[in-house]
Amino acid sequence: MQSKQPGLRSTKKTENSTTRKDTSRDSDVIIKEPVTKSVSTKTLPDRYFTESDIARILSNLDALRTDVYPADTPDKQPSAPAQHFPSVCLIGLGRCGSNIALDVSSLVYNARKYYLNEFRDEQNRAHEKESRPIRWIQRNLNLASKEVIKPVFLIEPLVVLGDLDKDIEGRIRFSSKNASGDFLTDYNKLKIMDLSEVHAGGAGNAPILGQYLAKIILKKETDHFSNKEWKFIHSYLIDSCGIKANQSRLYFYIFSAGGGTGSGMASEFGLAQQYSYMSKTFEVRSEREIQSKHQSFVFEPIFTSGICILPNISDRHSEMSEALHINAGRLLCKYLSEEWNFSYNSDREIENHSKDVLARIRPWNAMMLISNDIMRYAEQNDADSSIQNIDVNAMERYANQYISQQIFNILTAQAVTTDYDENYFRRAGIDIGETIRMDANDLFMSLAGPVAIAYAESVTDMATHTQRKELDIDDLFFRSIDLPHFNQKTQAIEGISLLPVESHKYRKALQQYRESNYDPSNLRKLHFFQNCSSVVSIVSLPKDYKLSYMALNRLKAHLNALFPNTTLKRYALVIGASANLSLTTLIAKSPCLSDDFLTLIVAFIKRCFARSDVGYDDTIDKAIVEFIQADEFDEEKLESMLLQHEDPAKILDTNWHAIKPMYEKKYREIIRDEKSFTSINDIRLNIDNVKDTIRYLRQIYRHRISKTRVISLNDGIDFNEMPEKSKEK
């Protein structure tokens, strides 16, 4: 017997959740699960609009493809096959996220332009060697060269930018004014989501409002938007993920955790994409329908990652807004709760497998964490104080450069052969056998949960190629895990994206590590290193540079020593992707045990959940640490300290109950189906989210693996005893 909860409607008995035709436009399907003693009744997340007509999806993709790859390009042949979408897509949400995504696309564009010019110069030098009569014949008879030079510099991602702003396109054009003047015109893979018809005034630094507005956007049928391009982008991002016609397999959502728009929108967009993708895995279409459209759904996995910019935690020179900490803590709490239910929660009884999986979706496979404290640490570690004289805009640009470089290195490790010009490797003198890449499935299996990034780069002296100094791999690895600092030689910020512990303690630990000739005995005791479940290391080499086998082995030795309990280590070697040699290491799951991460989560719980008697001292601070470390999780003690639902009014200096009806009215006006109405109260985080977050932290806190032991059935045999005949001889 199904029980009803206030504000929720049960599904009809005849409804089939695995049939898209019946359910794709129904945004209010709730699945009731049997109540057990240990598990409260759960419901499926609200549905999003997903186009169910394959023909319409393919038509929308064709329209977007035509825009991305214009047919009027000179080298486009009429009979040429349709272009593939790039294997990677960047989604920049909010002001911070869209600016960083724009930086990445500018970085790729400029790199490609550089190599285009380089190859054009090579072509011109080759033409000079040709005889004049041959050039005269080709020119007058209009004989085009069979080998058209159009090299692509590694991968050019499709970039989608979105913000709850009326003039997002104007802001994007203003932000890119320092780039090449033809950048926005020439980079056809840059698309802007104009969502101003739903809301044009931002989210007021309240993630719950950003989340609610994103829910409205994603529930509204795309044909009802006045902006006709939205349905093309929607079909690409959500409707078609995983199908044959959409070749993009990696999606990176870039946003600021401390704001309202990006922090609220990003996870909702990610959930809509995951819901659409997971729904397809349980969907069985007739063979006739598949053959008629030549489309098989879900033939390869996709990998999605949030790239989350965390706010400054503490700065002796300035006091940060506490609202930024609370907003970031809400996002982290929400994500860990969703990740726990997806990856670890085995308590729920599975009555219907497809419904159970869809009830457990999380927005991304992994969430990469980058602290906004990067510039502060870089300033403190700048010995000659040159970076301290940089103005605010330049500091932001350098910080964005750090983030952009990490994304860029990750992208180059995913590039597939269709992302390159077919003659690129040959012209660049690159042996494809030397380039080890990771596809979406590699990342899908290797990275999950919170992820931190360690990064460093070195200049290689190609002028003295035969007599160059051997690379100091020890120093390169140390700089990658060091506090963020400015490299004067490469003009780049290096270091770790999220500190394992407070900066003074970490600086002392690193000093001891270096003075002991890189003995990790003490450094690896930090939970950040000790409890890491997997690492992915990407080495990017300039063209024509050969990394010695001994250097690569030395790098692996450092990783094995510093991360003693990793279950999985993966490596990628990318050649020709950058002018300098760079090392990027992705550290999975254990970053959630870092000081900054825990501080942000506790800040949110304490401000928005705490009862009045424990909300003004350090009771909750100590209790959360106790809950993580204790052998048993005392849920009753937690319940005695917290309210059942978060209180959004705690971070807004206004009347929350007066704001709520305004946004709910917007929902009713845009989504006219009253049955699918969702109140803002329904998307508040509750005490179960806090419990699941603590369960996830407890799981990672206890992560240990033992080294493989030899198992033998011959242990009872004493090989020291020699046979009698052998003794006589």
Image: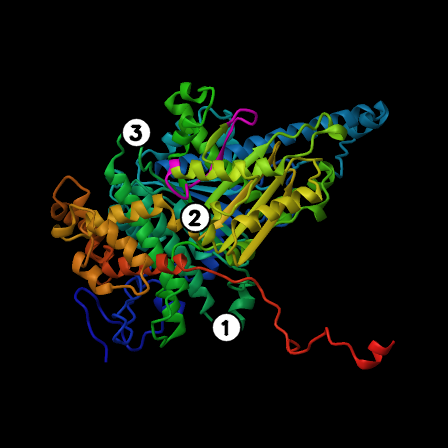
Other-residue count near label 3 (Cα within 10 Å), few / some / many at <14 / 14–19 / ≥20: few
- Quarter occupied by residue 378: top left
Residue at image coords 23%, 56%: 672
Circle 3 — which element?
Answer: loop
Q: How far apart are the two marked residues, 2 and 1, measured between alpha carbons?
A: 54 Å
Q: How far apart are the two marked residues, 3 and 2, measured between alpha carbons?
A: 25 Å
Residue at image coords 60%, 50%: 571
Q: Which of marks 1 and 3 is in front?
A: 3
Instruction: Say whether residue 179 is magenta.
Output: no
Q: Is any atom of residue 670 visible in this view?
A: no
Span highlighted in magenta in the image: 487-504
Circle 1 — which element?
Answer: loop
Residue 526 numbered tag: 2
Q: Nearer the viewer, mark 2 or mark 1?
A: 2
Relative height, residue 196 to residue 717 (above, below): above
Relative height, residue 466 to residue 349 (above, below): above
Q: Where is residue 397 in the image (x, y as percent from the top left)?
A: 43, 28
Q: Name, please, the residue furthest toward the right.
A: 729
Q: Which of marks 3 and 2 is nearer the N terminus?
A: 3
Residue type beneath disc 3: Arg
Front residue of 418 and 42: 42
Front residue of 437 and 510: 510
Reading the image, the residue beneath label 3 is 316
Front residue of 181 and 115: 115
Residue 286 numbered tag: 1
Residue type beneath disc 2: Leu
Residue type beneath disc 1: Ser
Q: Position of residue 3 (x, y in %)?
A: 21, 75
